[in-house]
Image (spheres, grey):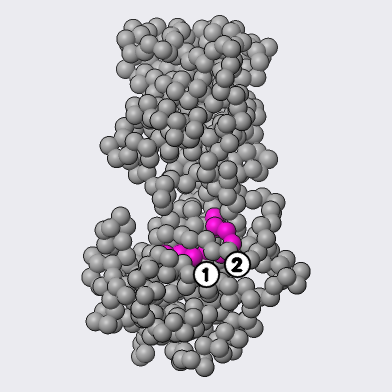
Amino acid sequence: MMTELLTAAQMRAIEEAAINSGDVTGLELMERAGRGVVEAVFEEWPELAKAPSRAVVLCGPGNNGGDGFVVARLLKEWGWEVEVFLYGDLTKLPPDAKVNYERWSTMGTVRPYVDEGDGAFWLDPVSWGPETLIVDALFGTGLTRPVDAFNAFGWATQMSGWRVDGRPLGGGNYPDARVVAVDIPSGLCADSGRYLRVDGQGPYHEDIRAHLTISFHALKLGHLLADGPAGCGKVVVKGIGLDCQNSQGIVRLLERPAFFQTKWTADHKYDHGHALVLSGGAGRTGAARLAARGALRIGAGLVTLGVPPSAQQEVACQVTSIMLRRVEGCDGLAGVLEDQRINAVCLGPGLGVERARALVPVALGEGGVQTHPMRSLVLDADALTAYEGDPGALFGMLHESCVLTPHGGEFARLFPDIAEKLNAPASEGPAFSKVDATREAAQRAGCIVLFKGADTVIAAPDGRCSINSAQYERATPWLATAGAGDVLAGFITGLLARGHEPMQAAEVAAWLHVECARSFGPGLIAEDLPEEVPKVLRALGM
């Protein structure tokens, strides 16, 4: 099961299609959006629905500002004390936003937002308490330039008790007001999740952050990528009566992948596949053993560790269910691969750069073993680093049944130009995103690329793309532990051995990887992940 994630352009196209069809007007969509914000606020903080409170609504010069005027009017009708500020030229408001400005004007005043000098915007800490609601309706998903002249508001959102895991940022010197963002916190690029800054720079305290963000119709990429989760706080999606319309190039959020489609009953262990995990030398076998254990736990019928002679005794003392084969060099690997029942190979965890450079070509069918079947391969860690400075040599050997699993550093070694674009300061939107980077990398490599992180992105050469998010309610910071990536490589290898196609294997493995971490909880070490698989699968009804 997957949820569609939209870019700003895709969302705009869906809205325009609905308006052009005559099914709804822009004014009706704006009203629904404003009502969705108020609903979400009362659902998040039920106590605010019980008695009138105080709201400060900051409206911008576009339709996002129009949503803000609707919110202000609805809260005023609820009996709230509401202050409204407008940034920009009133005469340039879009028609629908202008209508809602006029509706609000019959109920209250609108003050200009000024950041500096006489009359500058400032929230008085004496009257500003936990019952206060600050609504950011300045800029929405269509933002393409840095948000400047909002120093006071940006600083206030971080100094007013804005919290991560219950801890105040910026010292928490102000009472705990509640910051709500309409669409996305102003300044965040909705496509990349990156804060847009003048010349790519800008003090951190200017970044506007929210406790609660309300998105309409669907999540946007920026809610999940880069700085998005930290800026959004919590995201709620509110429907505004639009039909779900698929767009070309859609990205999907992994939820509960349909891995039940692959059979889990068979007559023989070889029906569940035979995975080979290659190990490094003595003292470097731990990573490969973690990967092998992951492949076995995820369901591969057999898993063999291929080890050099120097590590045979070390590994033999550590494994039982996992089998052991001597793989000394290229000839040794070619001999093992004569067994055509081996249908998935994992290279990289603890392999050593020199050994990886020698063995990867053999596993990929070079050096006289071209007659072997096109096996599925997972390349991780040292198998990727081995081609730093010469990634073309690797790309020339890869095929569609390969999966690359780089973290940020390994990605930069294989795709330095793409990484440079991704890491460049973001001064205009839509900014180059991790989705853009992973798609470009997959097309260049000609295989699946899984770009690791809390916002893991998985892409195929044909443009298919998904995000596995370990954020918000799925946050698992304890997953950042040595060896966790090796287990993920093993999970993918085991699923490939079982017969999953590479994109599906990468998606299912990434999702289960996070679920295992969530199931175990804090204190997790890499060895715990494979052992948590049975519990997670049972909970899924396996």
Does residue 56 appear left or right of residue 28 in this picture?
A: left
Compared to residue 322, the image places residue 488 above or below, namely below
Q: Which residues fall within the magenta stretch?
A: 212-221
Question: Which residue was labeled with disc 2?
Answer: 240
Q: Quick one: quadrant of the N terminus? A: top right
Secondary element type, mark 2: loop
Does residue 528 appear left or right of residue 403 in this picture?
A: left
* Figure quadrant of residue 20: bottom right
The circle drawn on residue 141 is: none
Who's the residue at 38% across and 85% down the image?
81
* Figure quadrant of residue 134: bottom left
The answer to which of 371 and 121 lies nearer the viewer is 121
CB within 8 Å, label 1 to label 2: yes
Identify residue type, mark 2. Answer: Ile
Residue 132 location, x and y as percent? 34, 76
Who's the residue at 63% across and 81% down the image?
96
Residue 82 location, x and y as percent? 41, 84
Question: Which residue was labeled with disc 1?
Answer: 36
The answer, for residue 325, to whether it is visible in the render is yes
The answer to which of 539 and 355 lies nearer the viewer is 539
Q: Earlier in the sequence, mark 1 or mark 2?
A: 1
